[in-house]
Amino acid sequence: MAYDDIFAKTKTELIDGKIVMMSPRPRISHNRVCTAISREFSSYLKGKPYEAFSDGVDVFLDEKNRFIPDVMIVCNRDIIHDDGIYGAPDLVVEVLSPTTARFDRGKKKDAYEKAGVKEYWIVDTFSRFVEVYLLSENGRFELDNIYYYYDNEEKAKINALPENSKDKVEIYDEIKISLYDDLVINLDDIFERIR
């Protein structure tokens, strides 16, 4: 069976030249988070020349890497074609699953970095956090921050801790998107239905 036949019949990605089968049915929490992030991006980009895409759109980075990110933002309209995105999106979001986590943190992250993706998110629905990587001037991803979601009860417990407690952590309620001066995503909007 040819590559094109396999791609057409199953949900696959091409990672470093190897066909990798994707999970055919993501968990509900995965879908909820993807939908929430996509909704926030699309709402902000309405009326602007940039576009947000969600799961199901192929990204052709190079001859060895064809991915299907969970959510992305594309600012260069010239790379948007009817059958996918040909080149690097500006922002990519990958939501971890047990079967994809090693690729999302490894070879896919490396390929996105090499292609010049400016901002890369890894979202963990089990531990409810978002890792944000920004492309540095030397062309490498650097961890900008890890944003943990805390519900109101958890926030109250953390805030009640003495300032010198080893368990005291800084609470971030929002993620500032590096691509735009005024795009901020509230963690409540991402994880509100994830328990």
Image (tube, rainbow, N blue to C red):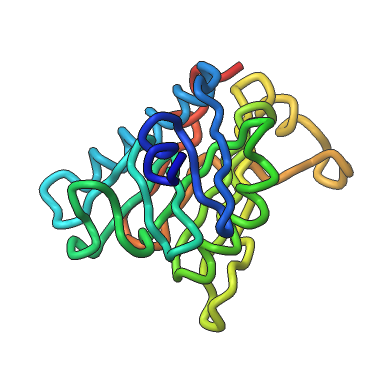
Name the residue: 66% across, 19% down. Answer: 153
Name the residue: 45% across, 24% down. Answer: 31
**Where is residue 49 shown, x and y percent of the image?**
14, 57
**Where is residue 15 shown, x and y percent of the image?**
56, 53
**Is residue 33 toward the left or the right of residue 168 in the image?**
left
**Is residue 94 toward the left or the right of residue 77 in the image?**
right
Q: Which residue appears farthest toward the front when viewing the image?
A: 1
Number of marks present in the image shown: 0
**Where is residue 151 shown, x and y percent of the image?**
60, 23
Instruction: State the quadrant of the C terminus.
Output: top right
Q: Is residue 48 above or below residue 68?
A: below
**Is residue 34 toward the left or the right of residue 152 in the image?**
left
**Where is residue 78 shown, x and y percent of the image?**
18, 65
Q: Which residue appears farthest toward the left when viewing the image?
A: 47
Q: Is residue 153 above or below residue 114?
A: above
Name the residue: 60% across, 22% down. Answer: 152
Depth order, front residue of 192/95: 95
Depth order, front residue of 115/131: 115
**Is residue 36 toward the left or the right of residue 124 in the image?**
left
Q: Is residue 186 above or below residue 117?
A: above
Name the residue: 38% across, 35% down. Answer: 55
